[in-house]
Amino acid sequence: MAAPKLGEFERIARFFAPLAAPEGLGLVDDVAIIEGPPGFQYVLKTDAIVEGVHFLPDDPADQVAQKLLRVNLSDLAGKGAAPVGYLLTTSLPRERDETWLEEFAKGLARDQREFGISLMGGDSVATGGPITLSVAAIGRVRRGEAVLRRGAMPGHAVFVSGTLGDAALGLKAIRGELPRLSAGDRAFLAERYRLPRPRLALGQRLVGIARAMMDVSDGLVADLGHICEVSGVGAVVEAARLPLSPAGRAAISAEPSLLAAALAAGDDYELLFTASPEVEERVTALSSELGVGVTRIGRVEAGAGVRVLDAKGAAIPLTDAGYRHF
Amino acid sequence: MAAPKLGEFERIARFFAPLAAPEGLGLVDDVAIIEGPPGFQYVLKTDAIVEGVHFLPDDPADQVAQKLLRVNLSDLAGKGAAPVGYLLTTSLPRERDETWLEEFAKGLARDQREFGISLMGGDSVATGGPITLSVAAIGRVRRGEAVLRRGAMPGHAVFVSGTLGDAALGLKAIRGELPRLSAGDRAFLAERYRLPRPRLALGQRLVGIARAMMDVSDGLVADLGHICEVSGVGAVVEAARLPLSPAGRAAISAEPSLLAAALAAGDDYELLFTASPEVEERVTALSSELGVGVTRIGRVEAGAGVRVLDAKGAAIPLTDAGYRHF
C-alpha cells in the first residue's frame, strides 16, 4: 500500500529499520527468526487485512477468515517453514452481529483442519471504523534452514509457482470490469482473489534447493526487486514465460494491457525463488510430485533492479507508479 | 470492550475457544506459551489499540507508541516473563503524514531503550478508518515458571501493585470531567492514562511467590473474576484497602461514586496476584526493594465470583453493566 508521500518500503527503511533487532533481519525479510527447541527456530510473521482495502464489505466472513490465515501462512511458506499456530487480533465495529463472527470462526476452523494449525491466543477490540484483522503466525524451521531473501546470486534461475495475475484480475471481475470474460473464468479468478493457496508443502520441500525465496504479495516485479535489493543483484524476467491461468490468458488476450496484472499486481501468494540452474530438474520433479506448477521465468544477473523483456528481447517499460498502483 | 449482544468473554468462549491449541491454554489466559531453547519457554501475547477507543486522536504519537508497547509488556509482566521483542502492525489512514510516523517511531525508540527490547518485524497497511495498531509481544520464562491465572486457591491473599483507578480518572480529567481537581492532580491522572507502567521487574521477581497472576486491564473486579473462574474459586475484596493515589483519593473524596474507577475501570496495567498469606513479608520486602507499592486487598475463598465489601463488611452491589461500561 503506498502512503501519502513515502511508499511503504521507504517508510519502513526510514522509521522502523533503525529500531530493528538482529532477529528482525533488518526488517528486509518480512519475518523474525528466534531460537526454538534444540535444532529448530521459530519464524514469526504478522499480516493485517482491512475491510475496504484487502477484502470487500460483502465478502463472506468465512472466506475473509481463510484469506487472513492464508496470507500469513503464505509468508511462512516463503521461508520454507512449517506452520505451528497463530494469534488473532480482531477489531470489529459494534454493529457486526454474531452471525458474522460465527461464519468467521467457521472459516478459521476449516483452515485450521486443512493446514494443521490452531489458535493460540489473541485480542478482540471494538472499532469505530472498518473491520481490521491481524494474525501473528508462528512457523518452525530446522535451525539455519529458513530461506531468506538475501541469497540470490548472478547465474541463478528465477522460478515462480502457480499462475500470476489471477487475484488482481479476480478483483476486477468481482467489480464487473471484465464483462467479456466467460462466467466460468470470472468465477475462477474471483476465487483466486478470495482464497489464496499458501504453497506450504512446496516451500518446505524447497529448503536446500531455493537460495532466496519469498511469497508474491506486492506483485512480481516489486517482490523480485526486494530479493534483488537485499541480495545486491539484478534480475531479468521474460514476459512470455509468465505462467498464466487459462482464465488469466483469456483476459489478457482480450485486453493486452492487463499483462500488468501478472507483472505488477499483488495478492497472488505464489512462491518466488531463485536457485542454481543445475537444480531445475529437481524443481520440475517436485512440481510434478506435489501437483503445483513451477515455472522458470528469468535469471539473476550482476547489477541492480528488475528488467522485464518481451518476446523479442526488448525491455517493457515499468514505472514505479505503474506497478505500485495497478 | 462489550459487543452488541454477547460480551467479549462470551464471544471468545463461544466462537474462539473451540479453535484453541493446547499452547493457547484454552484462551483463558490471554497468552500462548511455546517451547523455547533448552530450559526456556516463550510467552506470546497480542494486544491492539484503536484511535477513538483506546487513545484519543489528539494524543501525541510518541505516547501512543509507548502505550501500545506498554499494554503488551504489561501482559508479559503478568506472567512473570522477561520481554524479548515484538512485531508491530500499523493500519494508518492515508492522510496521516510522516510527522505522525516520525513521532510514533521516536516513542517506540524511547521505550525500546527503557525496556531493553527491539522491533523484530511487522506489517504496515492502509485503512479508510481510524488508526489501528497491534503488537505481538514475545517474552521468555524459565520452563514451567510462567504464572498463570489458574493457580488461585482458597486461603490465598489477593495483592495488587501500584494504585487503581488512576487511568479511568485520567481519561475523565482529559475530557474536562473533573474540573474541581487541582491542575497537578489532573496532570498526574492524565499521565497514568497515557503512559501505563508495565511492572516487569516485579512480575519476574514474583515467579515462585505468586500462584495466580495477570495484569489489570479490564478492571479489578472483572480481572479478579477471570482468575476466580479459571481457578474454580471465589474472592473477597475489601474496598477500604484499595490502593489509591493522592490524586485518585482527592477525586473520589469529592465524588464518592468515582470509587467505581478503582473497582471496575480498566487500563490500570497493575499486577493482580494471589499468594499464600505466609509470603506476605517477602512480598513487602520485594515492594520496598523495587520501589513499587504492593497492597493486600482481599482473599481467595471457596465458591465463585468476586464480592466487594465496604468498611463495615457490607457487600457493595456490582452489576455486570456497572463495571463493564464505566
Image (cartoon, coloured by chain):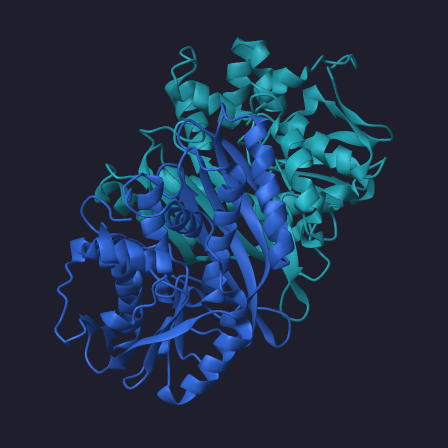
Chain colours: A cyan, B blue
Give the residue displayed 33% in from the left and 81% down from the top: B157
Is the residue B109 above or below the residue A248 in the image?
below
Is the residue A245 above or below the residue A113 in the image?
above
Using residue A225 as the reference point, say whether residue B238 is left or right of it: left
Is the residue A254 above or below the residue A16 in the image?
above
Q: Position of residue A5 (x, y in %)?
A: 60, 21
Q: Residue furthest bottom?
A: B278
Residue nearest the viewer, comparing A70 with B134: B134
Give the residue displayed 67% in from the left and 30% down from the top: A10
Give the residue displayed 63% in from the left and 31% down from the top: A11
Query: Would you say residue A289 is visible in this rendering?
Result: no
Q: Position of residue A222 (x, y in %)?
A: 66, 28
Using residue B42 as the reference point, say whether residue A157 is left or right of it: right
Q: Tell me how many marks there are.
A: 0
Q: Quadrant of residue A56?
A: top left
Give the residue displayed 60% in from the left and 16% down from the top: A259
Residue nearest the viewer, comparing B66 with A11: B66
Residue nearest the viewer, comparing B128 with B63: B63
Q: Position of residue A254 (x, y in %)?
A: 52, 9
Using residue B84 as the reference point, say whether residue A174 is left or right of it: left
Is the residue B53 above or below the residue A246 in the image?
below
Query: Would you say residue A168 is visible in this rendering?
Result: yes
Using residue A84 as the reference point, say whether residue A315 is left or right of it: right
Q: Position of residue A23 (x, y in %)?
A: 68, 54
